[in-house]
Structure formats: C-alpha cells, structure tokens
Image: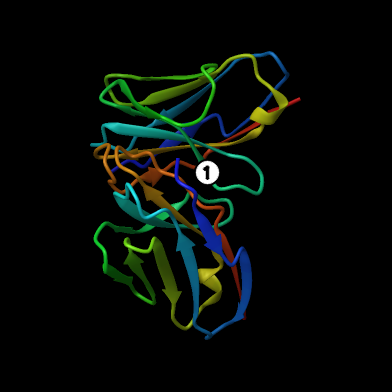
C-alpha cells in the first residue's frame, strides 16, 4: 500500500506568480482534500475532490483551484500569489467523501516573497 | 464552517503523568469528529473517528470520548511517554468532509 505523497516539498515564489502543487492519493482512495496551514493555526479546508469533481469548498477565493485526475491524484493551483499564501499545504486522501478517515501527505511548504 | 476550540493550547507534563485535552464545537449539523496526532516533521496521523453521541474509542494508552449534544470531545493520555509529544488536533465535520480543524493542543512530555 502506497501512502500519500506530495510534491514539491518546498517552494519559493514571488507575489503575482502562479503555483501548482501535486498530491498522489493512497491506493484505493477516490477522495482528496486540500488544506492550508498558516503559522499558528490549524489546517484550513480549501476544497475536496471526489471522483474528479469538486465536492465542497472552504472560504478561499477563486484563485485557488484544483483538479483531480482519473487515477485520483490531484493538483492545487494558486494564481496571483499573495504574501499571505505562504503556508504549509496538506493534502489528505480517503476512501470516500463523508467523514471517512483521512490519510495525510507530508505537505508542501510554500513561501511567497 | 464550524468554530472549533481546543484547550489548552499547550502543556508540559512529566513522563508517567496522565493528561487530557478538550475540543469544543457547535453541536448543530454534526457528522463526525476526528482526532489527529501531528508530530514535528511528520504528517498528521489519524487517531480516532467518532460519530455517535457517547462514543468512546481507545488505542493503547490514548482514549477519547464524544458528546455531540453539548459539543465537546475529550482526549485522554494515560501514563504519558516522551513519544507522545506532538500536537493533537481535533476536526469535527458537518458532513461531506467539510472538516474544520482546531488550532491544536501541543503536548510536551518531559522525561
């Protein structure tokens, strides 16, 4: 069984740039959720993808977008980066969208200068 | 989005002491509550998923209880060990995986 992986592990961008973060879900999981964890806060829910469709979204602007592929891996795209986007981005996969146990990846640390 | 509060924010205990933390959340529109342990430089690790009022779950020296009517959950650690040092996060969800995490309780167990 392969765990959840994320790439890259670290990333530095400048304001206004765009970034794509990637997540490979655990084998057998069809649901991926993305979270942003800013310093001193708990992870904040960005959105969830279930069977290639967005299935719920948190309080994030439209410049945060995502995709899920037929193999259930997922991308998080952030356009027009702002300084406040600097955070740890976590993805978590699960075997379904409702209250199932989530398995987290190690995260991508994004720094926006 | 649920308003989730965890207390205390941090605590230090001696090895062998037992401890507990609290997670408070709105009791309306509750679906499930997750507890996670997050060690530094690692991924959050799921401890428990609880759904029913009165649920009690146990894994080794760690246990948790759930009260959905009053909106709280307790996590207990019996006989704390240095390897228990981590941040413990609770995350209630209101269905369809709209999970809201608390800010966590950071536990430091002193040998």
- For disc 1, the marked residue is A43
Q: Which chain is mark 1 on? A: A
Query: In this rendering, would A31 be left or right of A106?
Result: left
Q: Where residue B57 sits in the image (x, y, percent)? A: 29, 69
Query: In this rendering, would A78 be left or right of A4?
Result: right
Q: Quadrant of residue A10?
A: top right
Whether residue A45 is situated above or below residue A65 in the rendered picture: below
Count of numbered badges drawn on the protein: 1
**Residue in the foreground of this view, choosing between B94 and B101:** B94
Q: Which image quarter is the N terminus of chain A in?
A: top left
Q: Where residue B91 sits in the image (x, y, percent)? A: 42, 51
Q: Secondary structure at mark 1?
A: loop
**Residue in the foreground of this view, choosing between A10 and B37:** B37
Query: In this rendering, would A67 be left or right of B110?
Result: left
Outermost residue toward the bottom in this view:
B16
Query: In this rendering, would B101 be left or right of B73?
Result: right
**Residue in the foreground of this view, choosing between B99 and A38:** B99
Q: Where residue A63 sits in the image (x, y, percent)? A: 55, 16
Whether residue A44 is situated above or below residue B34 in the rendered picture: above
Q: Residue at x 36, y 69 (%)?
A: B64
Judge the density around disc 1: few (<14), some (14-19), many (≥20) Cα neighbours within 10 Å: many
Q: Residue at x 43, y 74 (%)?
A: B76
Q: Which image quarter is the C terminus of chain A in?
A: top right
Q: Where residue B11 sits in the image (x, y, percent)? A: 62, 71
Outermost residue toward the right in this view:
A113
């Amino acid at each position: 069984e392969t765990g959840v992986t994320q790439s890259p592990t670290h990333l530095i961008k400048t304001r206004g740039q765009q970034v794509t973060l990637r997540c490979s879900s655990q084998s057998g999981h069809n649901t991926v959720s993305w979270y942003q964890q800013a310093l001193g806060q708990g992870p904040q829910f960005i959105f969830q993808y279930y069977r290639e469709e967005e299935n719920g979204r948190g309080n994030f602007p439209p410049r945060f977008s995502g995709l899920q592929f037929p193999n259930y891996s997922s991308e998080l795209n952030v356009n027009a980066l702002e300084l406040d986007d600097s955070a740890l981005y976590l993805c978590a996969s699960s075997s379904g969208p409702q209250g199932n146990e989530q398995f987290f990846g190690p995260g991508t640390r994004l720094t926006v200068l | 989005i649920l308003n989730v509060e965890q207390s205390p924010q941090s605590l230090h205990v001696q090895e062998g002491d037992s401890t507990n933390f609290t997670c408070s959340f709105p009791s309306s529109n509750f679906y499930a509550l997750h507890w996670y342990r997050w060690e530094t430089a690692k991924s959050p690790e799921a401890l428990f998923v609880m759904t029913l009022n009165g649920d009690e779950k146990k894994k080794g020296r760690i246990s948790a209880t759930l009260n959905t009517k009053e909106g709280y959950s307790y996590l207990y650690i019996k006989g704390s060990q240095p390897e228990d040092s981590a941040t413990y996060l609770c995350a209630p969800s209101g269905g369809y995986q709209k999970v809201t995490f608390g800010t966590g309780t950071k536990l430091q167990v002193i040998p």
